[in-house]
Amino acid sequence: MLIDAGLNGKQTKIRMRDAGLDIEEIDAILITHEHIDHIAGAGVLSRRFKIPVYMTELTAFFSEMRIGELDNKRMFKANEEFRIGEFTIQPFSISHDAADPVGFLLEVDGNKVGICTDLGVIPHYIQEILHDVNTLFIESNHDLEMLKNGSYPPDLKKRIGSNVGHLSNEDAAKAPLDIIGERTEYVLLSHLSRENNTPSKAYHTVRGMLREFHLSPKLHLTRRDGISEMITLGE
């Protein structure tokens, strides 16, 4: 499964090839919300490789306004579990300035992966859903001081820092404290801002908090300009 499709078809194919994966083997594309950096390649990939696209009805409506009609789409409802093959998927509502944004809890063969990006806050119910996942994929979007002193206009700074915006490094450092359990092996930091963050700031902010609370999952940074390290669960 591919979670979101923000790159064009060519780049998606190249990066999958670089990771040793075959785009022809994708069985489904799951969409979190309709912002263009999450859907730009969905239509092309779906048409070219006959891949169904799973999304909520509101997300589908606003996505198709931006990228055209999606013939092979499948609807799900936020907070209602569904299955694709051997995977159980629990989409959960998140706080972001989109029509019906969701995160995902994926489970297969006893392994759980939490996908939690593009949200302004992580309330208690999301912490409960994601508790003790094997892998937590969470955004660490911006450094507070870099955002405050950066070049973005005031309205955009306000939006990013709001409850329907994005998680800061500090937010990303605190969130796992109530999510990490005995099975949690990996925390992956994602969606780092090019303008308002650095990989070093994100990594060291989160690593410092984890060490303070004596938590020791493997911490990884994901990349926006290429593939990240391959992680295999259940080995």
Image (spheres, grey):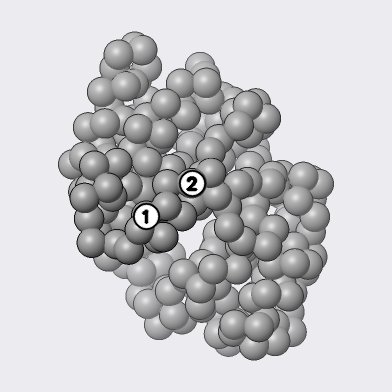
Mark carried by residue 162: 2
Circles 2, 1 touching at the beta carbon (< 8 Å): no
Q: Secondary structure at mark 2?
A: loop
Q: Which of the pair 93/10 is nearer the observer? A: 93
Q: Is residue 74 left or right of residue 42?
A: right
Q: Amino acid at mark 1?
A: Lys
172 above or below 34?
above
x, y (%) of residue 16? 40, 67
| Label 1 residue SS | helix
Residue in the image at 32% along x and 47% along y: 142
Residue at 23% in and 61% down: 151
Count up the numbered dots: 2
Decide which of 112, 160 is in the foreground and name it.
160
Q: Is residue 227 left or right of residue 135?
A: left
Going from the N terminus, do you reach mark 2 or mark 1 first? 1
Q: Which mark is residue 200?
A: none
Disc 2 residue crowd, few under 14, some 14–19, many 20+, Cα 10 Å: some
Residue 27 rendering spot, x and y as whole percentages:
64, 66
Badge 1 density bin: few <14, some 14–19, many ≥20, Cα 10 Å? some
* Residue 75 visible within the image: yes
The residue shown at (54%, 64%) is 4
Between the C-alphas of marks 2 and 1, the distance is: 9 Å
Q: Amino acid type of disc 2?
A: Ser
User: Which quadrant: the N terminus?
Assistant: bottom right
State the residue in front, 23 or 187. Answer: 187
**Residue 15, position in %: x, y?**
36, 69
Residue 118 sits above or below residue 6 on the image: above
Question: Circle 1 is placed at which residue position?
Answer: 157
- Most extreme residue toward the front is 154
Give residue 7's quadrant in the image.
Answer: bottom left
Q: Residue at x 37, y 25 (%)?
A: 217
